[in-house]
Image (spheres, grey):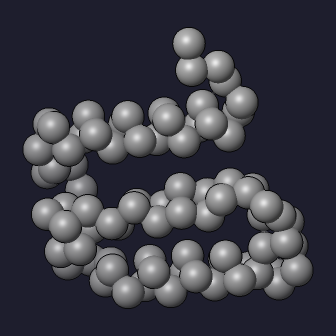
Amino acid sequence: MQPHTAYPAVLMTTGANDPRVAPWQSRKFTAALQNATTSDRPILLLTRVNAGHGIGAPFSQRVGNTAIMLTFFAQELGLDAK
């Protein structure tokens, strides 16, 4: 990542109990990206408490993640909520 760069909007997700990627790594990367960007686009991190790495998430959590992602994309694309 390059400092003083206009990065696009970013929505990162992480699991608090992920054995492969420690949550602090996602937090550190998100904070560094927020610090480096010169754009006004949001750089967000969603941390799921009972989530890990892979497709083992319950159906309700997958649906919730999809809803959050679609809402984020719709907002960034300026789509009408109607």
Residue 21 located left or right of residue 54? right
Residue situated furthest front in the rendering: 82
Residue 31 located left or right of residue 70? right
Residue at x 26% of width, y 62% of height: 48
Looking at the rendered structure, the number of numbered marks drawn on it comes to 0
Q: Is residue 21 visible?
A: yes
Q: Position of residue 39 (x, y in %)?
A: 83, 64
Residue situated furthest top in the rendering: 82
Residue at x 66% of width, y 59% of height: 42
Eyeballing the image, is 50 above or below 62? below
Residue 60 located left or right of residue 39? left
The quadrant of the rendering that contains the N terminus is bottom right
Q: Position of residue 47 (x, y in %)?
A: 33, 66
Residue 51 located left or right of residue 44? left
Q: For residue 34, which quarter of the picture?
A: bottom right
Q: For residue 3, which quarter of the picture?
A: bottom right
Q: Position of residue 82 (x, y in %)?
A: 56, 12
Q: Position of residue 35 (x, y in %)?
A: 71, 83
Residue at x 16% of width, y 49% of height: 57
Q: For residue 27, which quarter of the picture?
A: bottom left
Residue at x 28% of width, y 40% of height: 64
Q: Is residue 18 visible?
A: no
